[in-house]
Amino acid sequence: MTKTKVEHCPFCGKESYYHQTKSMTLRYKSHPITVEQPGYWCNECGEGVIGGEDRKATQKELQGLRAQIDGLLSPDDIKLIREKLKLTQQKASDLFGGGVNAFSRYERGETPIPRAASQLLQLLGAHPNLLTELSKSSIKTNPNKANKGKMAATG
Ligand SMILES: [Zn+2]
């Protein structure tokens, strides 16, 4: 890792204050989770400041670890399944709810995915053919009311 020397530590005044990564162990629901957290860390006193960009660097990983503990899909899993289902983030948000940017937030680890959406996505990942069932119900205006020829199931 490259260390960038900045200035004197604002906490102890020593010249050991760098932008660097530090192994940090946090607790989530009594489970310890460790991430390599970038930030301005002092090598003398161990104090540090984590900026907005630094936080962003670990948010996805942290969300993934929390998701594991909660039994939810991780940001990477969400993306993987969404792409497997050939859905855009927008289309996925339409189908599963949560607002227009929901999937973009889930996949960046900014917001945890709701349990119901996570479970549904997991089912669809295992049985992609069920997506047609879901898509049907979300189409509000279907000009082809006639049901003949429509029942040729694909799955
Ligand atoms: Zn210090």
Image (cartoon, grey):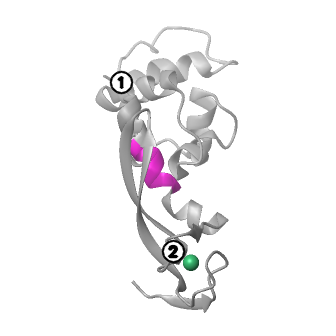
Asked whether 22 falls inside the magenta stretch, the response is no
Q: Nearer the viewer, residue 27 or 9?
A: 9
**Residue that numbered label 1 is attached to:** 123
As shown in the figure, which amino acid type bears the numbered disc 1? Leu
As shown in the figure, which amino acid type bears the numbered disc 2? Cys
Is 106 located above or below residue 61 in the figure? above
Q: Position of residue 131 (x, y in %)?
A: 43, 25
Residue under the point 54% across and 37% down: 112
Is 145 located above or below residue 106 in the figure? above
From the viewer's perspective, tell me whether residue 10 is left or right of residue 66: right
Q: Nearer the viewer, residue 84 or 132?
A: 84
Q: Which residues are magenta?
A: 59-65
Residue under the point 43% across and 54% down: 61
Is 69 located above or below residue 86 in the figure? above
Q: Is mark 2 within 8 Å of ligand 1?
A: yes
Q: Position of residue 62 (x, y in %)?
A: 45, 50
Q: Nearer the viewer, residue 73 or 64?
A: 64
Crowding at dot 2, Cα within 10 Å, few <14 / some 14-19 / many 20+, comes out as: some
Write down the quadrant of residue 2 in the picture: bottom left
**Quadrant of the image containing the N terminus:** bottom left
Disc 1 vs disc 2: which is toward the camera? 2
Secondary structure under the numbered disc 2 in the rendered image: loop
**Residue that numbered label 2 is attached to:** 45
Crowding at dot 1, Cα within 10 Å, few <14 / some 14-19 / many 20+, comes out as: some
Write down the quadrant of residue 67 in the picture: top left
Disc 1 and disc 2: Cα gap in Å?
49 Å
Secondary structure under the numbered disc 1 in the rendered image: helix
